[in-house]
Each structure stands twice: as C-alpha cells, then as structure tokens.
Amino acid sequence: MAIAGLAAVPQQSHRPHGWRRWLFATNHKDIGSLYLWFAFCMFLVGGVLALCIRAELFRPGLQFFQPELFNQLTTLHGLIMVFGAIMPAFTGLANWMLPLMIGAPDMAFARMNNWSFWLLPPAMALLLLSFVVPGGAAAAGWTLYAPLSVQLGMGMDLTIFAIHILGVSSIMGAINIVVTIINLRAPGMGMMKMPMFAWASLITAYLIIAVMPVLAGAVTMVLTDRHFGTHFFNAAGGGDPILYQHVFWFFGHPEVYIMALPAFGIVSQVIPTFARKPLFGYTSMVYATSSIGVLSFMVWAHHMFVTGMPATAQLFFMYATMLIAVPTGVKVFNWIATMWEGSMSFETPMLFAIGFILLFTIGGLSGVTLSVAAVDVQLHGSYYVVAHFHYVLVAGALFSLFSAVYYWFPKMTGRMYVERLGQLHFWWSLLWFNVTFFPMHFLGLAGMPRRIPDYALQFTQFNQIASVGAFMFGLGQLIFLVNILYSLRHGKTAAQQPWEGGNTLEWRLPTPAPYHSFSEAPQLDVAENGVVVAMQGGKHG
Amino acid sequence: MASGMQAANLTLLRRLLLLVLLMFGFAWGLVPLYRVICEVTGLNRVVVADAMPGRDAAQIAARPVLLQLDAMVQPGLPWQVRPLQSRLQVKTGQFIQLQYELRNNSRQQVVGQAIPRYLPAEAAAYVKKLECFCFRQQLFQPGETRRFPVVLVIDRTLPAAIDSITLSYSVFDVPQGEGGP
Amino acid sequence: MSCRYMPGSTAASSLFVSTAIEAQVAAINLQAPATSLARLEYDLHSMLLLVTGGIFLLVLAVMLYAIVRHRKSAGHAAKLFHENTTVEIIWTIIPLLILLLIAWPATQAVLNQKSTRGEELTIKITGYQWKWRYDYLDDNFGFMSHLATPAAAIAGTVAKPLNYLLEVDEPLVVPTGRKVRLLLTANDVIHSWWVPQLGIKQDAIPGFLRDAWFMVDRPGIYRGQCSELCGKDHGFMPIVVDARSPEDYEHWRAARLKQAAASADDPTRVWTLAALRERGEKVYGQNCIPCHQANGRGIPGSFPALDGSPVVNGDKAGHINIVLNGSQKNPAMQAWGKQLSDTDIAAVISYERNAWGNHTGQLVQPAEIRAARTGAAS
C-alpha cells in the first residue's frame, strides 16, 4: 500500500494495523500522510476539471460541454483546488513537520486531528456528487455570488453543506496547529527563534480560525435566502446583493493569504538550507508575515472596484492593497539576500523554491497593477485576473508544496526521491506553467472575460497556446507521481541529514523519523529560524 | 503528557473556539453594520419628510441643476412605476413638483414601499423631500393605478461638483404582516 | 504593444473584411482607446507595466547573478551574514516611494472616472438573463439587445462570422462628442457592462442603480461583453455600441421616435392565428430559446420541455399565468409580464400552443393578456 510508505518504519508495536491504522489514526505522521495523499488526489481531480475547461476553450464554438456544465466545471475546479487540494496539503505538511521542527511529541489534540481529516472525504464526496443531482453542481463560480447562487438548483445546497463541513474541518486543524505551536514547543525553542514554517503556519491557522466562520455565515445566509424566505441578498425584500460580496471577500481575501503564507514559510526553510547560509532578516520576516496577515483583513473590497463604490472607498482600498506590496517585497528581497553570497546547490527543492520566488513575483506585480482601481476597471473579471491568481496560487502555493515534499521526503520515508526525475518535473512544470498562464495576461488585456465557455475569434491563438500548455503541465504531474511511487519502494536509503545545509530540528532525528518522535522533549539551544545549535536529551518511541 | 500541559491546551482551545463563535457572529453582525454604514453615508436615505433648508442657506445664489427621474421595480414584483416627466431643468432652492404613476399589475391587493435612491449618492443629503409617496406604505387594489405628487427642494448648499441629480424610486413589496428580515 | 485589435467602423468593416481571419490578430495589450477614460486607463496601465516590469527585471538580474556566481559548484564559500538594518530600511522605503508615485496618477484617474458632471444624454441600461435593455430616458423609448450570432455558428455547423459572439440585433446608438451618462441596473442577477474601448466596466445590480459615463471621440462600432458571471449564457450577451456623428445620431433618433409612435401596438386589435404565430416565433427566438430550446424540448433536469407540456396543452389561464408571473417552483422562469408587451405575450403563448407537437389550435388575444394582468377576467 502506497500510503503506508509515507509513514515511518515501525519502531514500536503498539499501533493498529491495516485500515484501522488510518481510520482511527491519531499519530500526526499518519494523519499528515493521509492529508497529503488526499490533497494530491484532489489536485488530480481538480486538474482533470481544469483540463475539461481548457479542452472546451481550445477552439471557439461549443465542442464538448454545454454552457451550464462549463460553469459547473469552473466552479468545482476552484472549490476543489482551494478547499480540497491546497489547504489540506498545507495542513498535512504542518501535521507532519511541525512536531518534528519544534520538538513536540505529537499534535496537541490527537483525536480532534483524526476528525479534522476524516471530515474532508465526505465533504469532497458531496461536492463531486452534486454533479449528478438534478440541475447539476453549483455553477456560480467559487465565489458563489448571490443572487445567482440563490437561483441555482439542489447542487448549490450540497455545496453549501460541503463548505460547512470543510469549514469545521479546517478550523479544527487550525486550532490544533495553534495549540501545538503555542504550548508544545520543546524547552529552548523560543517564539522568536522557531522556524519560519512554524510562524507561517501559526499565522495561517489564526487566519483560518478568524475567517472560515465568516464564510460559513455567508453561505448560511444564502441557504436561508434559498429556502427559508429571508432576504439578505434579495433587493425585493430589502436586502442587498453587494452585502454578500462584502461578507464573502472579508473571508476571501485572507483566504488568499491562507494559501500563500505557508508557502512563504516553506521557502524560508528551503532557501537557507541550499544556500548553506542563515535566513536573511528573520525578525523582519516574522513582522512582514504578521503584517500581511493583519493587512489582509483591510483590503477585501479591492475585489469589488466595479460594483460602484463611492470614490473615497475605492481610494481607501486601493491604498491599503498597494501597501501589502511592501511587506511582500521585503520577503522577496530577504530570500534573495539569503541566496546572495551563499554557496548554493540546486537540488529539486531549491529549484522549486527559486521557481516560486520568480513566478510569485510576477503574480505580486500583476497584483499591484490590479490594485490600481482605474486600471482594474479594464482588468476586473477578465482573463488577466485568471492569469494573476494562477501565478499566485499555482506558482506560489503548488510550487512551494512540491518543494516541501521533495525537501522532507527523505525524512518522512527514509528514502531519496529520484533526483533526475525531480529536476525534469521542475523544468517541465516551469515551462508549461508559463505557456499556459502567461498568454492569459494578453487575453485579459485584449478584452476576454473570464468564466465564458466560448469566445470571439480574435482570442483563438492564445487560448490554443494556453490549452496545449495546460495539457502538458497536467501530464508533467505524472512525473511527480511516478517519482514518489517508485522512490517509496526503490529509492536509495537516505542519510539522517540528506542536505548539507539542513540544520533545523527535524534533521536531528533518525531517518526515517521514528513513529513516536520526541516522546520526551529535548533541551535545545536554538538560533533564529529554528537552527539547532545544541540538543540534549529527547527520547523517541 | 503532564496534566498541567493538558489544562493549558484546553484553556487555549476554549479561547480559540470562542474566537470562532465571535467571528461567526461577526459575519451576521455585518448585516446590520452594513445597513448602518449605508445610512450614515446617506446611501440609503431614510424615508421621512425633511425640514425645509435653513435660512442661512438663502444667502447662496440659486443655480441650475438637471434633475433626472427614474423608477425601478424589484425583480418578480407586480408593480409598474413611472415618472410622468423624465428630465427637468430646476434651480436650487426652488419648490419642485413631480408626479409618479404607480400601477398594481397583479390580481391581489399589494402593499408597496418606495425607497428613493440618488445618483450621485452624496446628493441624498441635499434633496429635501417635503411630500412623497415614499413616506408611507401604499395599499393598492388589484389592477389599481394611482398618481402621486412629490414635492422637493434642492438645498442651495449643494456642492458645486454636482450639476445633475438622478432620483430613482425602487418599489418593494411589503409582505402583509411582517417587516422583512 | 504594437499589434492592437482595432475594429473598423461599420462601413469599413463590411467593405474591408471578407474573412474571419482578419479578426484573428492576437492582441497583447488593451484595446485602442476611444474615450478619454479609456485613454487614461491605457496610459496608466502602460506606466504600471514599465514600473513593475522594471522591478521584475531588477529582481531577476540580482537573482541570476547570485545563481551564477554564488554556487557551490563554482567553489563559492557562503558568507554567513544574516542581517543588515540599513539595507532592510532602504528596501522598505524605496517600494513605498514607488507606490506613492503610482498612487498620485491613480487617484486622479479614480476621481475622473467618478465624475458624471455635465452629461448631455442619459441612457438606462438593464441587464437581463441574458440580454441587455437600453432605455433612452430623455426620449422615452427603449429596446432589447440580443446576441445575433446564429446558434448554428456556435455549434459549428456553419462558418463563424467575423464578429462571432460580439454582434447584436440592435446596438446601443450614441452620438460622438457628447457626454453620455449611463444608469445601470439589472432585473435578475448581477451583470457587468464592459466595453473595453470606451473604458467602462460597471456592475449592473438588481434593485440598485449605478452610474457611469463616457464621451466617444470618433464614430465607430465598439464591442464588449458581460463580465460578471450571470448564469448559463453569461458568455452570450455581448454589447455593441454604435457611435455616430451628432447629425447621424439625430437622424437615427428621429426615425426611432417615429417608429416607436407607429409600432405601439393597439392592445385591442384582434389577431389571426397565423399572424400571431409568426410574431410569436420571433418573440420565442429572442426570449425563450436559451432555456426551452428551439425544438421546445428544454434541457432535461434543468429546463422543462414545452413540446407536449401539460401547461402548454392545458388550460389557457394556467399558461398565461406562468408566462406573465413566472414560476414559483423554478426561479429560472421569470415573470415576463414586466418585459414584454401584451401583444408579444399573446403571440408567444399562441405560438407555443401550436408549435412542435402541440396542436391545440387555440390562440390568445392581447386583450386576454391585458385582462389577466389586471385580474378583471380570464
């Protein structure tokens, strides 16, 4: 069984075997593996939906899907990628690595951890099931704007229910992360010393706790408008459709950072390791990450520049959004300063981290362009926005996830991945990602709206390029799957410290990490970013 | 695990759950908050008669303003509403008389409430309504058509940046026996 | 930036362009501006592109330099510095200054977009699923504007026309050189009115009124699309603005006023079945086809069939009621009473009752619709 491979070789006898090990899992490593495999499956499902979209858009005219099904595909692609792939993947990594990086025996609430994972499959099943109910799946875009979402069929109710379950799951996961980081750090692992990945996970978890309930509130209002005669978003009853957008984006903008901050954390671990140099400006990184977290609550209405806000509101949200570029820029400069005068080597994790910096910078700069309200008038709701957020989420979140999996794979499994396949995976992904998404900037500028199943003739060429790129990019992800499956069984045995520059706590553990690590906390002397200077004690098993 | 640690974990858990509840409440709190913001900024002007503009305003010279009239009926409602004039050249400080025609197209008795909306939104504070069918709910018999006079004065303190105002009535259905959400 | 997509004026495009190939020039920048607003946006975007592009190249250059020179394989030893307050302050302040430089023209542009002063013509735009309605408030006439691309072109059974999906049966006609003020609202869900060359995108929100303005520099046809997901046919509700010289506009307006006066249907006229069916087929084509389909079979699971439907073949009153007032069960069925005239509703009902496999032989007169509206009799 492939899943079994991602957990450690047994050192202790007292753990359940077979399906019970997974269904009743309370070990953070098992749960982390479950999260990661689940996220990868959902990434493939969401990817297949994306390829359906790109297939339809290969040529003008309607070829494969009717418009209503096309809208369902775009909606579910967004929901599945956000809630099924990216968020669980980060939670899985945090589950796996946080206890190892801060010297905790496990996550704080092991049983709740089990629940927060096992709520995910039913929620995703509901979402997928909604394709076959009368009227089909939700077709209002992942933003589920009212009043369109009030108008739709039963698939919308299933979606709302699924979002509630997903919300509960991610809130429980986030609570676990907060409590683990705040309370379970080993002696000597101070808050202003702990790894950036722990900081990023902590701030992300707080964001999740703060905004997932707001999303739950928004979709509950849609639900009561649909079935219980309320008029929150129905102007005929004294409601206001724009109110939905305010509530949704109050969740939605921090959500963007929920998907980006853990990526910042990962890259801040990977770059120092492969530059063989400490992270530059650790303290300013912590403050930059925190201020991005705070600012993310103050910019939501930049998603609503064309709803007809008063000029003063437009200006406020424009300035606040531009301001976010400053701490984000600080982070990029810090990473580059970490690379500067380093002694770099370019194994796969480092390649993905560098790819991340490069492409995330493009996404960030197109974000600055979008933040200028007067220009946003042309770009809002166009393919330019599609290009922008895929640069942030695919190149940002996904590339950092690949970087993290390659980076920690030896510690998780005791085996090395195949380096040549990893390198191929990176260059392939980098090339086809850009072929897919860069032309979308042009499409948006030239006037192609997003979420349309068919388009005017002058958009044909770039759509064809993007579709070819998308299929090649999708194909490339099989390289990753093959690499992982092969390496789980046949990879070379990994050393305790496979990377020369890795000096955070997880690399002090045997490889693979023991099933019960740090059951007795070690005494640590730690430098910034979790770099272990000295360690005493600490028992496993 | 030490029991002291266990207790600390649970305390933090309780605080975080409280935060979750607060934020869920906050989402619902945004509904009235949003309404309050709209009131304060004059985006939704209250439907009560205004006082005449103050005397000191009379010092300011009257100036021409273009008044555009319009009406909207909410989707799915059986009303028909139209202004009898659509465009008026008026002066600030002058009494303006308009007429609106409302018709109930349904076979039921209906009660409607009109809400005036202004463009630009800042103009709301300067348009003083002295007489308006929006001051009260209106009962209509099946198929009934009625004309209503509207009397208003545009305050002379109207900012110079505004040289035309659109007044558009939105008519809402008032379900009998309840007041909306 | 050199290859812009420039649609010609009406006359030019019909003479000049013979194949669809001409339209396939791939544009990589904003469309050529035709209003001061669009020009403002165009210039602002060009400025941003230079600034952000410059920053990106700078970041890329520094990174590439480090990648080439500071690598282990090149024998470079790591220098273990990890702090430099001066550098950190500098790279916080400089981006702030750059942002301030951007903020100044950006603020000016926002204020300019919001200024609806001095308008000379007001047009109310209403978004419907899935078409636009334009009402000339000053002149008291208006019309619906539907997609004109035939279904066969979308399905691919006939060649796609030059302005595939960007053509309508009746464009919005405006005069050049005059400030046109738009009032926007919607009838069902949120739509968004976007014409790139005019520099306008404004959401149309049901129950609320928003405004925007433009003044077109030169005569021409300007095309755009709905840019807020509004349901099934979101991709099929284009916008076409036909800007004419003031004299040409006045001619069009005079003709339009005359036509409006002449075509006001006499609701008491008694029609023959053949005449009503003929008109009804047109009304059906413009309003009902997206859901109920040309063959009347609907889309199973979403939109019911009319061919053989018990409502259509049953009692006239029930049929009239659902067309006039919409369906309680399925909100996608709108109350058409607000959009269509008595004559159009009578026509479409008469058509449906005598089309496909429906052979009731019954016709509904406009007077019956009028009666049903007021509930006097049925």
Image (tube, grey):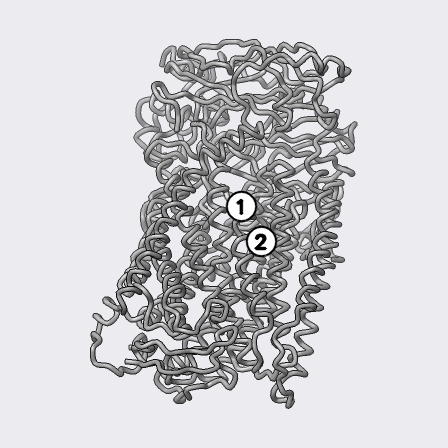
Q: Residue at x 37, y 62 (%)?
A: A179
Give the percent coordinates (x, y) of residue C72. Answer: 61, 87
Q: Nearer the viewer, residue C245 or C155?
A: C245
Is residue C93 placed above or below B77 in the rendered structure?
below
Q: Chain of mark 2?
A: A
Is residue B176 placed above or below A155 in the rendered structure?
above
Q: Residue at x 44, y 62 (%)?
A: A202
Give the number of callouts.
Answer: 2
Q: Are marks 2 and 1 in contact (CB under 8 Å)?
A: no
Q: Nearer the viewer, residue A186 or C40?
A: A186
Label 2: how many residues lie within 10 Å, few (<14), some (14-19) or many (20+)? Answer: many
Q: Nearer the viewer, residue C61 or C197?
A: C61
User: Cα distance, mark 2 to mark 1?
Assistant: 17 Å
Is residue C42 placed above or below A80 in the rendered structure?
above
**Label at residue A140:** none
Q: Residue at x 39, y 83 (%)?
A: A536
Q: Residue at x 70, y 54 (%)?
A: C99
Task: Specify the amino acid type for callout 2.
Answer: Val
Query: Of helix, strand and loop, which one carries label 2?
Result: helix
Residue wearing tag 2: A385
Of all residues shown, which one is farthest toward the front? B4
Give the percent coordinates (x, y) of residue A118. Answer: 29, 61
Quick one: quadrant of the C terminus of chain A? Answer: bottom left
Q: Nearer the viewer, residue A234 or A174?
A: A174
Decide if residue A129 is on the left or right side of residue A328. Answer: left
Query: Of helix, strand and loop, which one carries label 1?
Result: helix
Task: Specify the amino acid type for callout 1.
Answer: Gly
Q: Chain of mark 1?
A: C
Residue wearing tag 1: C235
Give the percent coordinates (x, y) of residue C345. Answer: 46, 23
